[in-house]
């Protein structure tokens, strides 16, 4: 299976999160819901996510969607740490950037005119929780083909009591809500925002995405999975795979990131099974660089509708974005532009940086030794940018 990262997961730092609320406010008019999770559903969720019915790690169970304080330099950013859930948080962060900044025409217009724009001041004037709930709702709704969805919320009762099942404190207590109306979904999510901002919020969000898409559709999205039965959305070290990133960004769990179906390998030989990639241009893109191997990403993700990318640079996942939407539509805009790089890490020096990209002056690597020397001295995030703008000159502000 194609993965962005095959390296072992680093230990997640503990973050202080509000506890999950025991009370849930339901707006669903369907009296048949919520429904308690069954033993088979609980096992299937774990197998699709982890490839095993065993419980997920405590790092995942402790992670929620938490903004930095309004007084912080990046009040628009979600907190992350070096754990597997970080990839999911950054996918949601990319959606927050889209909804928080690109829906404001004055902000975008000022950036296009070359004026100094304060993202922090803009974020402080907004209801950040409202925007977060909108983003989570949009992502879940898209996974259900914008027709219906299912939401997983942890209740107070244990529904799965089987001697072969190992509880984790979350999965066996899930109540499942179904929605056929986006306004109802958004209202429900907003009324229960504490569930997503508290411990386990990220896991519940991923569970909701999986339940909404459904196992059959996930298998269909992937084409023919390698094991013939399951698509594993996390690596053995509980880090995101290409399939999970694609599911979060596009609503479909394609195993690969190239364009469309691939019938031949790089040497021209026919593949035993065609590899399913991305069929449509995505709102949010992906750029990736790895010292050890090449990661193939097609134009559907390299050139998204918005200048926002999930950036995986040698196992470190963050978000790259520009405030100039014409960067995706006009080649002249690509001559000289800014890119913001956000990781969400608690360490301030690694949290946020701004990069200047100049494609007018080529950085030539004439020999193989030149390329080798460049890789030794160039930061991985710059190499990641160079996968789209080859030979660009990049400076950190």
Image (tube, rainbow, N blue to C red):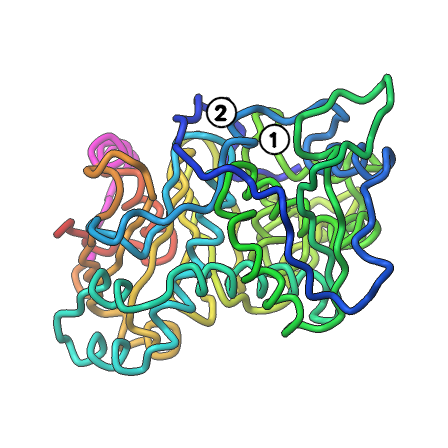
In the image, taking residue 245 as reference, residue 152 lies left or right, namely: right
- In the image, the segment drawn in magenta is 362-377
Element assignment for label 2: loop
In the image, taking residue 368 as reference, residue 198 lies left or right, namely: right
As drawn, 180 above or below 276: below
- The residue lying furthest to the front in this view is 23
Magenta segment, prevailing SS (helix, strand or loop): helix
Tell which of 82 and 168 is nearer to you: 168
Q: Are marks 2 and 1 in contact (CB under 8 Å)?
A: yes
Q: Position of residue 261 (x, y in %)?
A: 70, 58
- Rendered residue at 52%/39% (across/down): 4
Asked whether residue 359 is in view, the answer is no
As drawn, 245 above or below 60: below
In the image, taking residue 281 as reference, residue 227 lies left or right, namely: right
As drawn, 141 above or below 183: above
Q: Is residue 372 magenta?
A: yes
Which image quadrant for residue 124?
bottom left
Q: Position of residue 167 (x, y in %)?
A: 72, 24
Tell which of 125 and 245 is nearer to you: 125
- Rendered residue at 36%/49% (across/down): 67
As drawn, 335 above or below 54: below
- Rendered residue at 27%/46% (across/down): 382
Which mark is drawn over residue 235?
Answer: 1
Q: Position of residue 143 (x, y in %)?
A: 68, 60
Measured Cα–Cα span from mark 2 to mark 1: 9 Å
- Rendered residue at 55%/24% (across/down): 58
Asked whether residue 340 is in view, the answer is yes
Element assignment for label 1: loop
For disc 2, the marked residue is 9
Q: Is residue 99 magenta?
A: no
């Amino acid at each position: 299976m194609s993965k962005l990262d095959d390296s072992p997961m680093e230990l997640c730092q503990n973050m202080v999160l509000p506890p999950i609320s025991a009370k849930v406010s339901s707006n669903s008019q369907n009296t048949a819901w919520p429904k308690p999770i069954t033993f088979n559903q609980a096992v299937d969720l774990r197998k699709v996510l982890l490839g095993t019915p065993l419980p997920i790690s405590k790092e995942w169970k402790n992670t929620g969607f938490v903004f930095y304080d309004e007084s912080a330099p990046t009040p628009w950013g979600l907190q992350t740490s070096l754990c597997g859930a970080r990839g999911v948080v950054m996918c949601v962060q990319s959606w927050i950037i889209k909804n928080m900044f690109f829906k404001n025409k004055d902000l975008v217009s000022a950036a296009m005119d070359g004026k100094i724009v304060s993202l922090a001041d803009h974020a402080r004037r907004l209801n950040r929780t409202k925007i977060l709930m909108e983003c989570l709702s949009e992502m879940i709704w898209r996974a259900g083909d914008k027709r219906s969805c299912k939401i997983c919320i942890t209740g107070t009762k244990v529904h799965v009591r089987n001697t072969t099942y190992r509880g984790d404190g979350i999965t066996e207590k899930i109540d499942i809500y179904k929605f056929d109306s986006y306004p109802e979904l958004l209202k429900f999510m907003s009324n229960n925002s504490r569930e997503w901002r508290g411990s386990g919020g990220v896991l519940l969000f991923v569970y909701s995405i999986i339940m909404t898409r459904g196992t059959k559709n996930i298998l269909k999205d992937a084409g023919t999975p390698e094991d013939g039965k399951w698509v594993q959305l996390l690596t053995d070290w509980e880090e995101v795979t290409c399939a999970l990133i694609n599911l979060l960004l596009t609503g479909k769990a394609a195993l690969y990131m190239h364009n469309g179906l691939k019938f031949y390998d790089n040497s021209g030989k026919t593949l035993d099974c065609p590899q399913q990639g991305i069929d449509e241009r995505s709102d949010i893109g992906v750029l990736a660089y790895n010292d050890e191997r090449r990661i193939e990403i097609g134009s559907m993700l390299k050139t998204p509708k918005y200048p926002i990318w999930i950036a995986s640079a040698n196992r470190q996942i963050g978000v790259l974005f520009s405030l100039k939407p014409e960067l995706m539509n006009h080649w002249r805009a690509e001559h000289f532009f800014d890119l913001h790089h956000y990781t969400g890490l608690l360490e301030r020096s690694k949290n946020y940086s701004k990069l200047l990209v100049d494609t007018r002056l080529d950085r030539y690597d004439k020999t193989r030794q030149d390329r080798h020397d460049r890789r030794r001295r160039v930061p991985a995030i710059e190499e990641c940018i160079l996968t789209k703008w080859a030979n660009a000159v990049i400076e950190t502000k």
